Image (cartoon, rainbow, N blue to C red):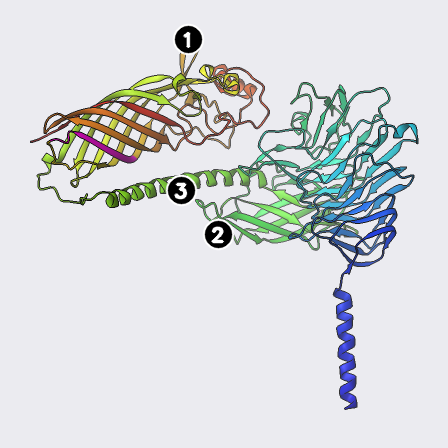
Amino acid sequence: MKQFSHIQILIVLLFSCVMSLSAQELISGDYKELIIKEGRYEINKNVVVSESLIINPGAIITLLDGASIISLGSVYIDGKDRGLEISSPKNSSGSGLIIKGNSQSKINILNTTFKNLILPLFFDVNWSRESVVIKGNSFLDNIGIKATIQVLNAPYNYFELTETIVFLFEGNLFSGNKSPIYIEDITNEKIQFKISNNAFVSNILYGFGNYSIANNVIHGRADFKDTYFSNVIENNSFYQNYLINTFSDTIVRQANVGVFGTLKAFNLKNNFLGNVSLKTIKETFYDQSVDADAPNILVDEFLEKPSNSSYPHVYEVLDSRNNVVLDSFKLKGTPFNFILKSNQPLNFSKAKVKYVFFESESSEKTVDTLAVSTFKLENNTSIRMNVLNEINKNNTQGYFKITNLSDQSNKPVGDVYLGYGSFLKEKYIRQKLSRQEEEVKEIMKEVEKIEEELKSSVTENIFEEINDSFKNRLEGSVHFGSVLYTGTISNDNFLNNDVNTSIGVTLKYYLYSKLSASITISSFKLSNSDLNSENTDKIRRGMSFATNGLSISPGINYEFVHFNLFSSLKLRPSVGVGLDLLNFKPTGIYKDEVYDLNSLGTGGQLTDPEKTPYSLMAFGYFLNFNLKYQWSDRNSVGVYFSFHKSLSDYLDDVGPDTFPKSADLIENVSVEAAYFSNPTGYKYTPGTYRNSPRNGGDKYLDFGLIYSRKLFK
């Protein structure tokens, strides 16, 4: 009995130890002074600290349900060698640390990881402190859409009361975040910013396709005033920071720094900007090159590789031929051999390679797995990575994401992507093709639905057999009418669109008493001009086109009147649905000469290796309505109306392509190609689509007179 009692005591002690290790202490309420020691903590409501906030090494703080830590006084957070983490679970995100109010105290945030938060650091409006030091921290995979770090202005009169606030942001890692660093006034007479030795790596910002000031890893206002400080932004490293189109999930561009304001020139010298080409570097900025009223970012003196004093990270990847791996690199083939170059020695002992690839050559489905890989140290700052492509037996396109790399002290250094840009482009193309296939399926479903509705809507059986010979069921028709184009280059006012002619013939065969099959061959012309529009955006675009079209259109028709009925019922309405096979060839006029627009590649098809010229054959579908007056048992005349939608968006040559650079078209194609690509020469924001606003496939209406005759008695 005594032995059993000892066992019970031992079990209770073990259970207590386990519970103490797994338990998280809840922090809540308001504090004058708050010291958070080593251990696990949970915060699910805002905690306000009025004077002093201290967080010691080894603390792991989980923020839930949008909760924040709000400091009105001093802050001292330092993970030192033991680390410190403020984070959220993915299913219940917390906000972060908010600095509010005026205080003659200091902010020191050192060696801390901020992860999966909505807004990790927020310096609220009219805040002020003696100094701010943010050093040696990691901002990883934060999910807010507004900002990861946001610094608003100090009070207007604060400069008259105390000395300058020195704001030091040094030696930090900013990686995997979905929102930028926003500084309300980068040039400032109250706050002197010193941003140096940071690594901005593999951040993915989302936008709506058009490049804007807010779509950059760092952005803010830069005004000119004699009393404003010349802030220091140097020895930083920017690598693989992308703006992603939210709708198409494709890379729009690399996006590093954006400024606006009255300052003439903004100094960004002595930073590594992900490339050694000045032209390519300039394309990663939002400045005077995008907005004529914005400052000009000066980068004539840039680092060809990151400083070894910057936060450790991978800054370049080479393939087996020592070529730099760019966004356009296609990850397809086997085996894979890369060299990862870093500015400081890295630890790859726990590194993993995530491998994402397409399930097959035609499918948009992807396989997400870990690749079999080996890492070998080439020298102190180069790692050779070998990957065996045994998993991807179909050898389809994919990309690698290298995770769990760290520095020599096991601090994270950010993820690395290989082949990601090309993969997203391929994914978008596959998704578009899949949508077109779904549209065709939906059309066929609509056809089946109409057929079912027609079956149930009439008293007579539409499948009533016709007691007549094959040739007596044949009917021929000729139609002549007008065509209105209502696609990309069209006008909102229906009557302001070009009116062209259409002519065609139809052969119809009556399958049953009220159901017939037909095939129509039509010849017509389509044309339109943006200059006739009342829409200022279209007038500014200034495009026009003309094309001759030839279509073959099989269809099925429901006849409201019985095939053999001819007496008092002389009006014979019918409705039909079917498919179009369309041949077209858009042209334009330049200096009184007609040009074939397809052969000029006006959407960049001849200058972008990722594109190919569009096909001049397209599928589509149509719906029609006929109302005929039958004056004899064999002859009838009437009117028709049909709506046609093409599955191609290039009937007018203006498809879902971004405006190519005119200089590239002039150099590689012709002056005419540059003109038809952008007739007005308007300077569009890079990434703007030529068919914007996007409206799917092109459409046209065909209506006019029709004469029909039963071919045999």
Q: Which residue, given by chain and number where applicable, does mark 1 sit on?
A: 592
Task: Report the side of 692 relative to 291 (left or right).
Answer: left
Secondary structure state at the residue bearing disc 1: loop
Query: Where 65 falls versus 263 (above or below)?
Result: below
Mark 2 and mark 1 in contact (Cβ < 8 Å)? no
Q: Which residue, given by chain and number where applicable, does mark 3 sit on?
A: 438
Could you tell me the amino acid type at mark 3?
Answer: Glu
Quarter holding residue 522: top left
Task: Report the side of 618 relative to 335 (left or right).
Answer: left
Looking at the rendered structure, which numbered label has been put on residue 513?
A: none
Could you tell me the amino acid type at mark 2?
Answer: Lys
The region drawn magenta spans 568-578
Q: Which residue, given by chain and number where applicable, does mark 2 sit on?
A: 393
Farthest residue, direction front: 568
The one of 210 and 424 positioned closer to us in this rendering: 210
Q: Position of residue 629 (x, y in %)?
A: 17, 26
| Residue 446 appears in the rendering | yes
Q: Residues within 10 Å of mark 1 (few under 14, many from 20)?
A: few
Could you tell me the amino acid type at mark 1?
Answer: Asp
User: Residue at position x 59%, y 29% from top?
Assistant: 210
